[in-house]
Image: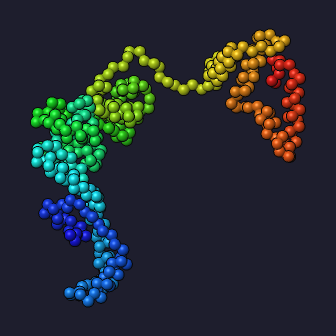
Amino acid sequence: MDFHYQKKHVELLVEKGIIPFKVSELECDFTECTIRAMKDRNDPNRPFPLRDSPEAMAYKNGIYQHGIVPVRQWYTEEHKNGNIKCNKKKIQNYLERKLLNQAAGIADLCISPQELLNRLGEHEHYCPVSLTLRDELVDCSATITTDYVAEYQGRYYRMAGPKELQLFLDDSERFAPVEPRKLLPAPNHRPHRRTEAEAKPMFPKPIEFASYWPVTYLEGEQEFPVEYRDKLYFLLNEEVREKFMRQPEKYWNIRLPNKLSPPKTPIDLLNLPCLGYLEQTIATVIIKSLTVTGTFKPKFPFLSIQASALIYMAYHLKAYNTKKQCELISYLAEKPTVRYKPPEYNVKYETFFVLRQNVPTLNWLT
């Protein structure tokens, strides 16, 4: 079929209710088209002349390139059927299930967003499987495709994923009965995601839960807001917000304990008392050094146990000092292999061997 290539042709078809199932565009280089036209023009079996001169071909190509862009864009956005592989098995499966009065998937069946919106079932944009099985409100309105949408009894039902879709297709009467077992909450009893920009105009509306995060019972920044029952909540992250959105009844009316931890306020390290300053700065390394010393139990010759322990601790603190490492041994191990030695090499070399004659003392490291 030689298809239309201007937007007015599309509008005429839509006006008559004609929507093609699949639109495929065959691309051919303009040079190739001109060569083919020249061959046809020289064909002796040509029944009648055509307007296929190079000038006419260039004019037709210009009109086509100008008019096809909005046509291609319209079919791709409205019906998702532009340049997509056709799957006849899906059509056959859809028709067979419709004849048997069963639920059928409508993926890639050219259902426009407006038609989907007009024929939504009683669950609207929420997944009926999640609501029935887990009592969860899973909002699928953000999904623009129809991959997880099923038609049943002339209504469309959105699903949270492929697993829920398959469950719905297998037992649609359970999840979409004539008289629903679990009704969707009223619009004012449904949670709504809010951005920070949307939450700001709501102030001075108080933040529920005393600025603590529901679900996690933690206190923190005011991010990931949710409005529920005309109240404002802030959640820890997107994952926690999704958990709140699915089961708001579980978290919206919780009570904080009577005794809460004091709020966290930063304190300047230099303003701490001496013991507090030492605790926040060197307590960890001192504890590690004491632990290693107690485990190893060092004893130097001719020195007391206390002096041996103090010297060993000093060695340990110096060895694990992240800000100042002793590079004497690594320096001496690296430089003897080179032909040219720096001037300071001999000094460091002699310093290293002088240490061999010294007996460890409390001020040996100074």
Quadrant of the rendering where the C terminus is positioned: top right
Q: Residue at x 14, y 60 (%)?
A: 17
For residue 216, above or below residue 348: above
In the image, 287 versus 282, the foreground residue is 287
Counting the numbered discs, the total is 0
- Res 176 quadrant in image: top left
For residue 170, above or below residue 289: below
Relative image position of residue 205 (x, y in whole percent) = 33, 31
Relative image position of residue 180 (x, y in whole percent) = 14, 33
In the image, 74 versus 157, the foreground residue is 157
What colour scheme was applied to this rendering of the protein?
rainbow
| Residue 163 visible, this orientation | yes
Quadrant of the rendering where the N terminus is positioned: bottom left
Q: Residue at x 38, y 16 (%)?
A: 257
Relative image position of residue 20 (x, y in whole percent) = 20, 61
| Residue 58 visible, this orientation | no
